Structure formats: structure tokens, C-alpha cells
Amino acid sequence: MIGRDIRYFFRTLGRQPGFALTVILSLAVGIGANTVMFGVARAILFDHIAARDPESLVLLEWSANDFPAESLSGSVSFDGANARSTSFSSPAYEMFARNARTLSSLVAFSGIDRLNVSIHGEPTIARGAMVSENYYDALGVRAALGRLLMRDNEAVISYAYWRSRLGGDPNVIGSALVLNGKPFTIAGVEPRAFRGTLDVGSAAQVTVPLSAQKTLFGVSDATNPSSWWVQLMGRRRGSDAQIASELTAMLQPQVHGPRIHVRALPGARGLGETRANLRQPVLILVAAVLLVLLIACTNVAGLLLARATSRRKEIAVRMSLGASRTALITQLLVESVTLSLLGGAAGIALAYWIRPLVPFVLTTPGPQLDVAVPIDVRVLLFTIAICVLTGVAFGIVPAMRATNIRITTTTRNRFANVLMTIQIAVSIVLMIGCGLFLRSLAYLESSERGFDANNLLLFRLDPTLNGYEGTRLVQFYDEVLTRVRAVPGVRIAAPTRYALLSGMSAIGTLIIEGKPVDEKKREYVYMHTVGEQFLDAMRIPVVLGRGIRASDDEGAPKVVLITQTLARQFFPHENPIGRHIGFSKKKAPAYEIVGIVRDARYTSMKDEMPPTVIFPYRQQLDRINSMSFVVRTSGDPHQLANAVRAAVRNIDPNVPLFDVRTQTEQIDESMRHERALAALSTFFGIVALVLSCIGLYGLMSYIAARRTRETGVRIALGARERDIAWNVLRRALRLVLIGVVAGGAASLAFTKYVQSLVYGIRVNDAATIAGAIAVMVAVTLVASWFPARRASRTDPVTALRAE
């Protein structure tokens, strides 16, 4: 019977291709966007690591009050004086592994931001990880190729890296690769589904044992109790409270001073810092695509209601011939579900097109996230389920109303009006969100940066990965500067630890000589390390005192520059030149302030000009590994990129350049998140407008057609064309007014959740709300004008003959 209904539906559909195309495209947008966001939410928020029994895994975290962060080389975050981290020392790991009774299969791992990987003499940068020897076995992970048990000079590569860098060569096991200038052998390839235990989007491409730390970096923290650098994960033997109690008692004697507390966190999803940061953007996008789907469903419901109403004669005849109401409702539902499935098929095709945008929207400072958004069996099942549900949801009410011959035209019109009002209200919410993101992006693009971004080429080097250190490292950087400055077209070249607006910066606690330290209030400042010509290259002027000189090296007194904001905030009524500051309460402030520079956005366009301290890089060599370089050119910096690259490669071809881009591209990169949000919200806003326009046009045309006889009578009695047209427009504007009020109220409740994602404006910005309303009214007038004009030109004779 259902098969017969489907065949009948396709026969009737062929006579209305415009209706079918409108419905399918409307649903394709809503279902396609939801398909992608289901995959995104699953991959980022819900997917477990591909390990055996992931629910039994726990991740260890510690917290302490007033922890001496200067004694750590690992990752730590602060909330006031409270420190929190998932980093532990190697001795702590070994102690827990030997003695803990509430945990089993304890593993240690640590991410490596950059590895210099050379295969067949071609050096590139890759993400890496160091893991304990029991890592893969304890997690229950089996190799896709080779083995995962590594010796000191062996490495395991990820499945994606094997395919992309090595072409999926099945004979790769035993092949040589050079990591940071040291020979290693590929022992195995991880399974395709395994993306490690590091933060989501940061899967390691090359994994080595913890014991390889000294080989790769020339140092070993295996016995250093002050280097908290590894994350720990194990399997529960006791409750979380028992784990916390046992491990806290074991760790406390190793920490002199503050009271420390260890906690057991769920470990099924691995590290969660990035996941926590992405939770809000993901949920906002999920809400947005659900609103788009709601608009699509209400639009399609209105179209189906109009179509079913136009078939009232057919339905009445079939019921008079004995067809039951249930059979007719079933047929209409089969039609709506079939349309939904067709829309879902088109939506999956759209989902493949949308997927590449995801990493640009869901991103954090630093490298672009490596987030896989699969269109797999689970996603297809989700799509089928949402197709069936939406098909029933938008089809059931029109089907019931169409088969109830006692329902009056007024009642049908009232239901259609409700659907249209919902569309308008949801469209207003999406358009206000679109306006907020667009105005936020415009604010960031027009904000004062404090430096000249034109004609600047950036690149980054990390020669420490190849064993450069100490004097040899300084000589390498000096040679780089000499060679690059000799390239024709280069005006200035200077080093900086981090490129401006790269999202990266060091943060320290400011100690001012002669001022007491408030233990309850830490004064944080940004810290940047640059070379002597950096300010000239960026065209950041020194407003008081002097700049950095080549003579500011390790043998000279320690000096710093400060920004105007820092001077105003910490030295409001005095000249700070000659004052001394420091960054550890254990040491006397030893850095003399020798200059004040103009404020600039050093780290992010999203931060106001923060208090910043600038160090000469020649006095900070013990804290520097990689280094960025800024090159001011006399012309287009793109044209000098190859020459600069060749100049550096001539020094040492095994040291790769990376992050090669112009400063303008760096600025664009720093706002990729905002650009993508603005682009997607604009797309959703346009879709909402188009669907609302289609729905409003259809509703006004339907109402005008239903009132053809009345219109003819009014014209025959002397009504003017403009009165007839205004009558149609007034109905549309009344719907818009109700929808705008409802949508405005809903937007105030919804947009408060996006305040942290917009900059320079408030979420209740009157101009944005007014703009959205103005656009909605304009679209309403356009969509209603054609039905209104057609109604005003009705021939009264023809109208009076109409039913």
C-alpha cells in the first residue's frame, strides 16, 4: 500500500516540479547543515578515544593554592592564586605506577608542538607525542601495520600521516626517518580510528617513547621532580574519590609548601582543554542549524498545507467513495516523508561541501585544528532519522487538516499564519546573530593595530630541533639575519619570539621594586622577546627613553621596554624609566626599564592593548627555542618569499622554514574564526530570508487566490487597485510585526550566549536589531508586492465566475 502511495505521489509530483524543487532545496539546506553539525558535535564533544573500554579510563589533574609556577616547565593555568594542571613530573608518574592500588595500567604522554621530520631528505614540521612504553598496550590499541611497541630509536606514525606523507606505502615498516636531526626507524602505523589521547584536533602525527626525549631535545626530565610535563591516564580500580585520596596522599610529600589535591577526571575522551573551549561555539552552531531546520520545516508545512487544500476536491471525492481518513492521512504522510528523504539526499551532498569550513570556524590560537567530520554510517542513520522525523513533523498537521472537510477556510488560514509567524520570528533571531557577527568582524578589521602591517614577510625557524643551542644558536640566528638582509628588496629584518597577532605570548606576574606584593592579587602582564630592529621593522615608535640595542646581550645589564598601557596602569604618576621590575617573588627585580613604546596589539586583535613587557632576545637565549622573523620589504613581500627561503636554506638545508606568510595574511589568519562565523551566519541568515520570502509569497498568493470572489465584488463596487493591494500588504505586515516582536524577544534570550564571541558591540545592539527588522520588512514588502499587485488587477467578471 505504501508502495502504491509512493508511485502515486511521484506521478502527481511530475505535474508540480516547482513545488517539489522548492521543498527539496529547503529541506536540503536544513538537513545538510544538521548532518554536518551532528558530525562535528560527535567528533568534538562526544566521541571516545579508540581504546579498549574507554569508560574505565581516568585522566589525572591536580590543583593547588599559590603553587610556585616558576618551578614548573609544564602547562599550568591560574584562577587568581589557584593553580590547576594535568601535567605531572616523571618521578610522580613512576611513583603512582608502582604504588597506586586504585589505578591500573597507568600511562604517561606528552605532546610535542613541532618535530623536524625529514623523510628522503625533505624536512617538514609535524606534530608529535612522547608516550610511556606501555601506552598502546594499556589502551588496547593494535597496529594497522607493523607493531606499536617502540624502542628508544623507533617511532610510530599516525594512519593519516602514513597516507598523506608516505602515500600509504605498505613497505614503510623499517624505513628510516630523521627526527630533529636524529635517525629513527618506523616501527608501526596506528589504526585509522585512533587519534591519540591529546586534545581534540591535535592528534600526534609521529609518536616516540618518553625515553627519546634526550635524543630529540638534548635534555631529559626523567628524574627531574620540578619538571611537570607529562599527562597521566589510567584505568579505575576504585572510585574517583578513592583515587583522589590515595594519589593526593602520595604526591603531597613531594611538593614543598602548598596544599595540593589530585582529582580523577573522566578520561574516555582524552585531554579536554580544547574541547571545553569549543563547547560554546559548537552548541551555538547546533542551535543555529536547528533554527534553520525549523524554518525549513515550517516553510514546507505551509507549502504542503496549500497543496493539500488545493486538492480538497480530490480528497472529498475519495472520502465519498469510501476512502478512510486514516488511509488519506497515511498517503499524505508518505508524500511528506518521501519529500523529506529526497531533501535529505540532497542535504548529504551539501554536507560534503560544508565540511571543509568546520576547522576554520572551530579554532583556537595557533595551528588550525585537525578535526575529522566523517560522513559515516552513524551520520547516515542520523540523517535518515531526521528525515523521517521532519517528514512526519511538518506533514502530520497539514494532512489532518486537509482531510478534515469540516475545517473552515478561516481555520486553515489561521494555521498558515501561525507557521509564517514562526518562520519570521526564527529568521529575525538568525539575522540578528548574523548582524552581530558581521559588525564584530568589521570592528576587528577597523581596529587600530599600532603597527604598519604592509610590506612585511614573516617566517619561523626552530634550529633547536636540529641540535643548535647556546652560542651556536645565536650564531645561526645572526647568520640568518645577515643572509636575509642581503636579499635585494629587503629593508629591515629582525627576530621576535612570536609574530605579532599569532595568538601566542608569554604571560608573567609583575613584581615592581619598592612595591609590596599582594599575595591575593596577581598582576599579569604579556611578555614579548624581540631583536634590536624589530620596532623599526614594525614601525612602532619609542615614545620615551630608548629602544633595544645590539649591545643588550647576556653580558650587559638586564633591560626591558614597557608599553604605554603598562606605564599608565602601574606607574600612573611617575616616570618609570630607570625603575626595576621582576617576575618572581623569589628574586629581586633585576630588569631596568629603559624605554616606553607605543601601544600595539601584540598577541590578538580581540584583546585591548594589554600591559606588555618587551625583552631583548639576546638576553633571553636560555628561554628561546623557535624564533620568528619579520622582514620589511620595499615591494610586494610575496615576491621575496622564495629568495628569503633560499637564503636560509643555504645556511642549513635541514632546518625547515614554516609559517611563511605576510603580516597581512597573519592578521587575516588571526581572525579566521570570526570570518568563518560571519560567513556561516550570513549564509544561514540569507537562507532564512529566502525561505521566509518563499513562504510569505506562497501564503499571500494562496490567501489572495482564496479571496478572488471577494476581491471581484469589491472591485465591482468601486474599490481602487491600491486599496486591494494595501489589503494584501497589510496582512503581510501584520504577520511580520508579530514575528518581529516574538523574534526580538527570543533573540535577547539567545544572543546573550554569544557575547563572548563578539567584539566591540553588545548583543543587544540597537543598530543591529533595527537593521535586521528593516531587512525583514523590506523582504516582506517585496514578497507580498507581487501577490498584492496581481490581486489588485483582478478582472471582476472573471472573479465573480470563480468558485
Image (cartoon, grey):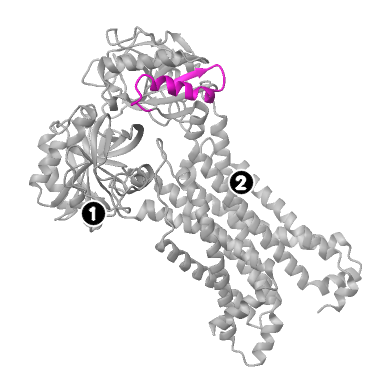
The answer to which image quadrant residue 98 occupies is: top left
Name the residue that disc number 2 marks: 769
Q: In this view, does 132 lie above or below 391?
A: above
Residues 631 and 223: in front is 631
The residue sitting at 45% across, 13% down in the picture is: 485
Residues 307 and 241: in front is 307
Question: Mark 1 or 2 closer to N-term?
Answer: 1
Residues 661 and 37: in front is 661
Most distant residue in the left direction: 99
Which mark, residue 142?
1
Q: Is residue 681 above or below residue 185?
A: below
Could you tell me which quadrant the C terminus lies in?
bottom right
Classify residue 154 as left or right of residue 17.
left
Q: How many labels does the image show?
A: 2
Residue 299 visible, this angle: yes
Q: Position of residue 48 (x, y in %)?
A: 31, 55
Please rate how many residues cluster around mark 2, counting C-alpha atoms within 10 Å: few if below 14, some from 14 to 19, many from 20: many
Could you tell me which quadrant the N terminus lies in?
bottom right
Most distant residue in the bottom direction: 322
Q: Where is residue 214 in the image (x, y as percent from the top left)?
A: 19, 30
The answer to which image quadrant residue 316 occupies is: bottom right
What residue span does the magenta drawing correspond to?
630-656
Q: Is residue 650 magenta?
A: yes
